[in-house]
Image (spheres, coloured by chain):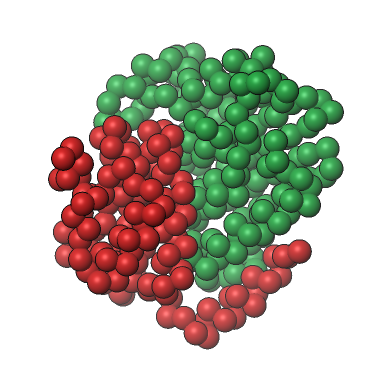
Amino acid sequence: MKSLEELRAIKAKMQNNVQLRGVDDADSVVRVVVGMATCGIAAGARPVLNKFIEEVQNRGLKNVLVTQTGCIGVCRLEPIVEIITPTGEKTTYVKMDADKVSKIVHEHLVNNRVVEEYTIANADK
Amino acid sequence: MKELSLNILDIAHNSVKAKASEIIISVEESLKRNIVAIDIKDNGCGMDKDFLSAVTDPFVTTRTTRKVGLGIPLLRQQALDTDGHFDISSQPGRGTEVYADFKLSHLDRPPVGDIASTVVSLISANPSIRYVYTHLTDFGSFTLDTDEVKEQLGDIPLNEPEILIWLTEYINENLQSIEGGKI
């Protein structure tokens, strides 16, 4: 069984191998914001959030910060995820699920191509 | 809400919004007592008497995007629907405590669900808050105190993805050993 002491080993490894996000590189951070109010949670935001964390870890994306917010205001389209680039461009993805997360991480976060079919602009088509 | 763990996540977000620095989450599952109980206690800004008495009304909310707040009414309804109990107490400046219990054997009782995901979601959103999560079953108990985690980690942020994934596995392993999250 795991014990908290194992974290020390992880800590040592991270300090050696990994460049942690510092305040100075805040300019280059892409933010992934998951709506986690009652509406988002009920619609399935939690697995979406966890999938983002998992994918970011698996792909070693150091410039991506996964965060959460309250109600974004379009509850019928939840779970909603906003991706905000360092220059402030915002893409809003709607009706998210874990499978869509994988595609968005691969296309948008890695290859910098917006997945148009999942965006709010295409929600009602 | 499909799982009680989602209700916990939702209610705990109220504590975050109330600027709590400490959130204590307790879950009990007991076949012997035929009960599932959840308790979320914070040291946030609290509520005055008037707001407290109105807060189980869906048309009372602090949110600004619209005039409906369903988190607390949903939890209360679900508890009462299973012959359970609901209680909320609060003092301005001191904090708030939300309690709900459910009759375990009741057909309409939602499953406890994925508590590890809930706790880790909360930590990832607000790593500066101290979370103390305790899970009690007929077979034992498990406690995760994020202050103890921070002690091990030093200056490594709690919300690094690698740490969050480790914590999920850590919680799940410990819950399995007390058969928590099964019912």
Question: Is residue A89 depicted above or below B65 in this figure?
Answer: below
List the single residue furthest toward the front.
A125
Residue B111 vs residue A89: left or right?
right
Image-quadrant location for residue A113: bottom left
Percent across and percent down for residue A125 are 16, 40
Q: Which chain is red?
A: A
In the rendering, what colour is chain B? green
Residue B44, given in percent of the width and then of the height, sits at 50, 37
Q: Note whether B47 is above or below B8 in the view shown.
A: above
Quarter-wise, where is residue B115 in the image?
top right
Residue placed most toward the observer, B62 or A29 = A29
In this view, the residue in front, B149 or B95, is: B149
Q: Position of residue B145 (x, y in %)?
A: 66, 53
Q: Residue at x 38, y 33 (%)?
A: A39
Does residue A66 show up? no
Among the 4 quarters of the image, the one containing residue B183: top right
Q: Please identify the quadrant where the N terminus of chain A is shown.
A: bottom right
Rendered residue at 46%/46% (across/down): A46
Q: Residue at x 49, y 23 (%)?
A: B74
Q: Residue at x 43, y 15 (%)?
A: B57
Relative image position of residue B38 (x, y in whole percent): 65, 32
Residue B66 to residue A116: above or below:
above
In the picture provided, is B64 more to the left or to the right than A38? Answer: left
Q: Nearer the viewer, residue A99 or A71?
A: A99
Kindly tell me whether residue B46 is visible in this rendering.
Answer: yes
